[in-house]
Image (cartoon, rainbow, N blue to C red):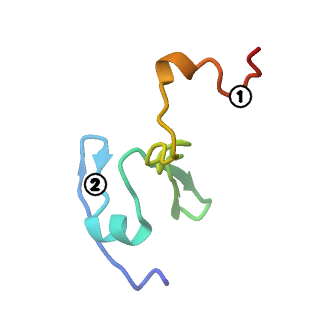
Amino acid sequence: MSSDDIRAESTVSGNQANIPARIRRELDIDDGDQLRWSLADDGSLRVEIVQQRRGTFADFDGYDGERETNAAEEHDAWGVDVE
């Protein structure tokens, strides 16, 4: 993608600026992502998207094993040898 492929404008309100929807979609910017700003000597502005880290269990759909579990009784025993 070159800088000429997608053009959009936004207005500054107070000390905030919105990222146009076309840009957010193209760069997959989502709630919680951060923007890292840097200003070059020539006056150009660079913005790097720092996407939020997804949780370890973000895609976990739950236990799909063959036996029923009881977390209240077994939670301390997971990964620990119990005599």
Q: Which mark is residue 79?
A: 1
Q: Amino acid at mark 2?
A: Asn
Q: Say what secondary structure mark 2 lies in.
A: loop
Q: Earlier in the sequence, mark 1 or mark 2?
A: 2
Provide residue 36's location: percent of width, then percent of height: 53, 50
**63 with respect to 81 (left or right):** left
Q: Amino acid at mark 1?
A: Gly
- Say which residue appears at 25% left-offset and 61% top-offset: 10
Dot 1 and dot 2 residues touching (CB under 8 Å): no
Provide residue 43's location: percent of width, then percent of height: 53, 61
Nearer to us: label 1 or label 2 = 1
How far apart marks 1 and 2 lie (CA) works out to 47 Å
- Residue at label 2? 18
**Mark 1: few/some/many CA within 10 Å (<14, 14-19, 20+):** few
Q: Is residue 64 above or below residue 47?
A: above
Q: Quadrant of the C terminus?
A: top right
Provide residue 82's location: percent of width, then percent of height: 74, 17
**5 with respect to 18 (left or right):** right
Q: Is residue 19 above or below residue 2?
A: above
Provide residue 21's location: percent of width, then percent of height: 27, 65
**5 with respect to 65 (left or right):** left
Which quadrant of the view contains residue 41? bottom right
Q: Nearer the viewer, residue 5 or 70?
A: 70
Number of numbered discs present? Answer: 2
Q: Is residue 28 above or below residue 31?
A: below
